[in-house]
Amino acid sequence: MTTVFLYGTLKRGGSNHAFVAHQRFLGTARTVPGFTLYSLGDYPGMVRAPGDTAGVTGELWVVDDTCLAELDKLEGLDEGLYGRIDVVLAPNPLASSAQTYLYARAHDGLSPLGDHWPVGNL
Ligand code: PCA
C-alpha cells in the first residue's frame, strides 16, 4: 500500500477520479512550500518553485499496488510526462510525506494556477 498526494484530475469530482474511487481516502493535505501548479489545459502539473511560500493543496489516498501501477501509466511516467516523487507535507494528522506526480516537462509559457486545481468549475 502507498499513500499518494493527488492534486488534479484524480481528486474527488475530477475527470480521472474513477481510478482511485475504490481506494481509501485519508483526507486533505498541503505540501510544504516550494511547489506550485501550472495549467496543461484539462489538467494541472505540479512543479518545484523555490520562491513559493504556499505549497499545493490536494488529497491523500492509500492505494494498492495494482492501482499505483495504473496511476503511473495514466500519468505517463514511461513517456516522461510526470515523474513520481516523495513530497513532504505541511504538518497534518494524517501523514508527513506521500508519493506524488511531479510534472517532468518544461513549463515555460503555461498559465500559473497557484496552490490548487479547481474541480468542477472549468
Ligand atoms: N492527475 C494527477 C496529477 C495531475 C493530474 O491531473 C493528480 O490528480 O494528482
Image (tube, rainbow, N blue to C red):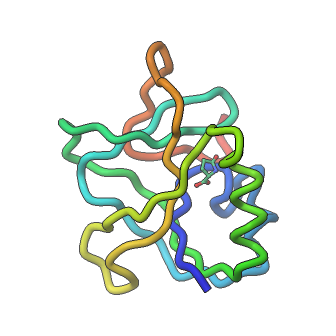
Expressed as whole percent of the image width and height from the top left, the position of residue 32 reads 26, 59
- Decide if residue 81 is on the left or right side of residue 36: right
The image shows residue 24, relative to residue 116, as above or below, that is below
Expressed as whole percent of the image width and height from the top left, the position of residue 21 reads 76, 73
Most distant residue in the front direction: 78
- For this rendering, which residue is in front, 88 or 37? 88
Expressed as whole percent of the image width and height from the top left, the position of residue 40 reads 61, 28
- For this rendering, which residue is in front, 87 or 113? 87
- Decide if residue 80 is on the left or right side of residue 70: left
Q: Residue at x 66, y 79 (%)?
A: 63
Most distant residue in the top direction: 109
The image shows residue 62, relative to residue 5, as above or below, that is below
The image shows residue 88, relative to residue 113, as above or below, that is below
Marker count (numbered):
0
Q: Quadrant of the C terminus?
A: top right
Q: Quadrant of the N terminus?
A: bottom right
Q: Residue at x 18, y 36 (%)?
A: 51
Q: Residue at x 24, y 75 (%)?
A: 91
Q: Quadrant of residue 2?
A: bottom right
- Decide if residue 79 is on the left or right side of residue 38: right
Q: Residue at x 76, y 54 (%)?
A: 73
Expressed as whole percent of the image width and height from the top left, the position of residue 34 reads 26, 46
